[in-house]
Image (spheres, rainbow, N blue to C red):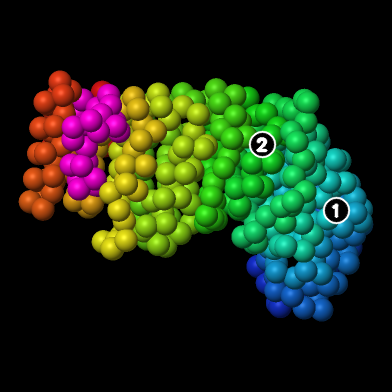
Amino acid sequence: MLDIWPPLPIIIRSRTTGVGGDNVVAALTHNVRVCEISLHSKPGSLWEKIMAAMQEPFPALTHLDIHTNDEKGIVSNSFLGGSAPNLRYFELSGVPLPGLLKLLSSATLLRTLHLWNIPRFGYISPETMATALSVLTRLETVSLDFQTRSYLGRGYRHPPPPTRSVLPALTEFYFEGVSEYLEDLVAWIDAPLLDSFEVTFYPQLIFHTPRLAQFIGRTPNLMACNKAYVTFDPFRASVSIAPLYLGILCVQTGRQLSMLAQVCRSSLPHISSLEQLYIHEEGYCRQPDDIENDQWLELLRPFTSVKALYLSQVITPRIAPALQVLVGERVTEVLPALQSLFLEDLHLSAQGAIDKFVAARQLSGHHIAISECDGPQEIDH
């Protein structure tokens, strides 16, 4: 029926190709008129027809959003005819990406790129990804989210290049995957205007991310804040230094703590200059049985300039036993600049430990004022 209308622009939106799928295929044959495609589909013969129809150029396309888990729905060199000159918004989920470099090299007007649930098949190396991003001078937002929890490039890591590609318009960057991939990717790029950087790592035994620390250190907006928020919930542990967020997906409380301590030491170049620290929990976090005092101290150790420490109601009795061991020669081993301790509620079980910590500091000439507060906003001064 499209033939009875004037050649108006076509927008194709379908949450499932089970209903009306033939109409989707028919609309795709008018490729020169299609300006927006949004398809969420399961694998099947009809989906294969749709992907086959998308091997032609779509010169008017500005918005592309495809979600599937069909490995046959591949971004090859012939996808969209290998060219997307007017594309502004590009979102893929569950789609293999071997032809991405060729496609993005033509998408010079692209502003938003979301690559979710990137499958193991069709893996793109950090160097190739950096090359693809480097030509997108108008790109403002990037999201990279991987299926695999192992680094496919392990053993093939290259030294950083002599010069890095600059992404001059990038302001938002979201990443979920293994730390080694991000570590290699950021060695190839600079994003001087970046003001939202959200990273979620999959759990691993060792986090060693000096290149990530260098990237953060040369990005001015990521170094502007002087307070950190450490958060534990049933599924992850994180540290937020607005506009920077680093999280680790893990359900084991003891591992959350040890991995987060590694990330803080390895990834945050300005951690020793922060003056406010807020530690709290979100949701139900069970009382761990396997956390030792030294694990809490390792988390606190890098925060050498913190003057104000806020502990939530649940965190106080967990961290207090670690603080009370800081006596004698160890009294300023961690948090040497601490002047104010803010507590949501002083549990009776933690009262003695807090008193011993404060008394030991007092004897060493480092007075600490204890205050009760309702939330972290009360230490913003």
Within-10-Å neighbours for mark 2: few <14, some 14–19, many 20+: many
Would you say residue 107 is visible in this rendering? no
Q: Is residue 231 left or right of residue 267?
A: left
Which sits in the foreground, 17 or 243? Answer: 243
Whether 338 is among the magenta residues is yes
Q: Position of residue 200 (x, y in %)?
A: 53, 49
> In the depicted view, which residue is nearer to us: 311 or 64?
311
Label 1 secondary element: loop
Specify start and end residues of the magenta stretch as a single range: 319-342
Name the residue carrying label 1: 99
Q: Residue furthest front?
A: 329
* Separation of marks 2 and 1 at Cα, in angstroms: 22 Å
Where in the figure is residue 31, as x and y percent of width and height? 88, 56
Asked if the magenta segment contains residue 119, the reply would be no
Residue at left offset 52%, top offset 37%:
267
Give amino acid for label 2: Val
Q: Is residue 252 visible?
A: yes
Residue type highlighted by circle 1: Gly
The residue that appears at 42% across and 62% down in the rendered structure is 251
Check the picture and name the quadrant holding the N terminus. Answer: bottom right
Q: Is residue 265 left or right of residue 357?
A: right
Quadrant (top left/top right/bottom left/bottom right) for the C terminus: top left
**Residue under circle 2?**
186
Residue 164, x across and y down, in percent: 74, 28
